[in-house]
Image: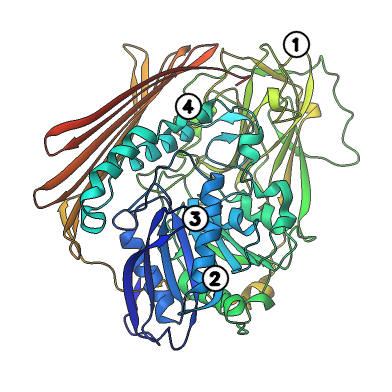
Amino acid sequence: MHIVSDFPRQIQEEETWITLADGCRLGVRIWRPVDAERHPVPAILEYLPYSKRDHTALRDAQMHPYWAGHGYAGVRVDLRGSGESDGVLTDEYLPQEQEDGVEILRWLGEQPWCTGNVGMVGISWGGFNGLQIAALQPPELKAVITLCSTDDRYADDIHHMGGCLLGDNLSWASTMFDGNASPPDPALVGERWRDMWLERLEGSGLWLIKWLEHQRRDAYWKHGSVCEDFSRIQCPVYAISGWADGYCNAVFHLLAGLDVPRKGLVGPWAHKYPHLGVPGPAIGFLQESLRWWDKWLKGEETGIMDEPMLRVWMQDSVPPSARYDTRPGRWVSEPTWPSPRIATHTLRLTDGHGLEPESPDSPPLAPADEALLAISSPLSVGLYAGKWCSYNAPPDLPHDQRDEDGGSLIFQTLRLKEAIEICGQPEVELDIEADQPVAMVALRLSNIAMDDKATRVSYGLLNLTHRDSDEFPEPLTPGKRYRVRIKLKHIAQQFAAGHAIRLSLSTSYWPLAWPSPKPVKLTINPAASYLRLPCRQPQPSEEASLHAFGEPEGAPPLARTLTRPSQEEWRVIRDLASDNNFLEVINDEGSYRLDDIDLTVAAQVVERYRYSYDHYDSLSGWTEWQRTFQRGDWKVRTVTRTLMTADAENFHLHATLDAYEGENRIFSKIWDEQIPRDLV
């Protein structure tokens, strides 16, 4: 990354509070030009539940001063109940959070150093609430950049996929369980820090309970899902994600659903800002953001809206790996989305496990009782799936799919005579039956190289009880045939000449998703089942004329001193003697001191997902977070543990929270909950 220290405008920084109408104080850090009161500037708000004081301090220091140096006020606010803000945070995307956000925008617009124009930016949580607050139409909010977020909290978030319960639901709940137990910094809030901390420890709760109480798309998930009424968003939106991220679909949904000036960008990245993007290539996101802010917050013509609506990284074929430093490919674009240049190419499944082009002279469909194929997958299918939401650290991308395909039905094309490219959302239509009333199907699209290595390109899940509705699921009738459609994740991918395209079908995908209550056998009629690919023709002259992204830039990083190195591991352990199988994920962030505030922080998480061979009641997910803060004689530590298991009727949760001041445990709480399965 190129470090920029010489900016057009000199910067000042302050940490202070915004006092809301109900008396609640929110912690805020502001970077702005020193002459902003004489020459006011627009503000750029990032609004998060992760402490600006430590959790995001390193990232914030390279972004917000950069914007400030170019004539903006970079503003980082901690949500009510997080960081140095008052209160207790009890769930994500609450109405209170959004109401507070509107009040923050009003406060910013009234400051003497602000022109009254405000933009919102954020990745993940900050991307969510930027869209949600935009839907409330506060007059100060003139534009949004939303990264790695979603328009639909049920269908396209970290909790569910195709009506299936994601393993990342537990992982994410554990992350917030840990984060919500963090104390405010006494250096800012003074002696009240301990009372604030104890209030959070007692009141924040175990969010996983309420998430599991809503297993279908009800009012709980509709709240904050801007897809419920896209017309509520009346300001320009720039939507950004990465192919390795869990949230790439939302870019396409927003482009298709919004009726405001909008742009979309999808790179090869995991859940990262694009100037920090891995897999690479990373881009000069901060320069790109200035082109957006200058247009919509300052009214300057930057040419950004003269460019194509959508720009994506067309990935080349690569060998499978759990981690990539970079993904080879090229930038391509579409002037609008949906694009009339994307053509659907239909392939029919065959009883010989082939994928054959559908054409007008294709033979008639085989009768439903002929040439059927069945599959009942072992629980091992999914151990090499990676995470739903990849951070590319520890190595969490899908590995060679041949390890998964042994427990799957596979269908494959002949070797391609010439390269083909897809851009959009593949879809599979199946003629299918199950032998259980609750069943899931997992579908994987893979690129098969000349040496037969299988790299996963896209995938999709469907809880078959949700075949017609996520809001009103219905059990299957065993033995009855159904026609179902499964949408896979959006992707832009080239399949090289000599490669083949494979579709793999399994009845489980653990631990990426929680399996059905009992073993399931699925039977499909391949002759009445299809794979539909969104094919795109290369546009070489158009691609050559695209605006070039600059190299990644940022303001000078915060000084920090490493006191313990980080450690990352992703291990599959198969004990054949006991028939116990584990996926173990270790992400030890190490320990370091933030030199400017003399604060040492350390954090580590261990996740273990387990099953015994063919025993569906043996599945479990376990997480443990440990986090430490220390300055001189002041030291606090938190330990959170969550265990989730299930039988055929219920999910079971056991969780503990322990907090230490020095060597003394000053708080401890235990949760034991049983939550009925709701056709999951």
Position of 571 relative to 92 (above/below): above
Position of 362 relative to 434 (above/below): below
Position of 416 relative to 672 (above/below): below
Q: Amino acid at mark 4?
A: Ile
Which mark is on residue 118? 2
Q: Residue furthest left?
A: 633
SS under mark 2? strand
Between marks 1 and 3, how big is the CA–CA gap? Answer: 46 Å
How crowded pointer 2 is (Cα within 10 Å; few <14, some 14-19, many 20+) is rated as many
| First in residue order: circle 3 vs circle 4 | 3
Between marks 1 and 2, how big is the CA–CA gap? Answer: 58 Å
Q: In which quadrant of the rendered image does the N terminus lie?
A: bottom left
Between marks 4 and 2, how big is the CA–CA gap? Answer: 36 Å
Viewer-side label of 1, 2: 2
- Residue named by callout 4: 209
> Depth check: 220 or 300 in front?
220
| First in residue order: circle 1 vs circle 3 | 3
| First in residue order: circle 1 vs circle 4 | 4
Relative image position of residue 679 (x, y in whole percent): 63, 19
Between marks 3 and 2, how big is the CA–CA gap? Answer: 15 Å
Relative image position of residue 379 (x, y in whole percent): 49, 20
| First in residue order: circle 4 vs circle 2 | 2
- Residue named by callout 3: 126
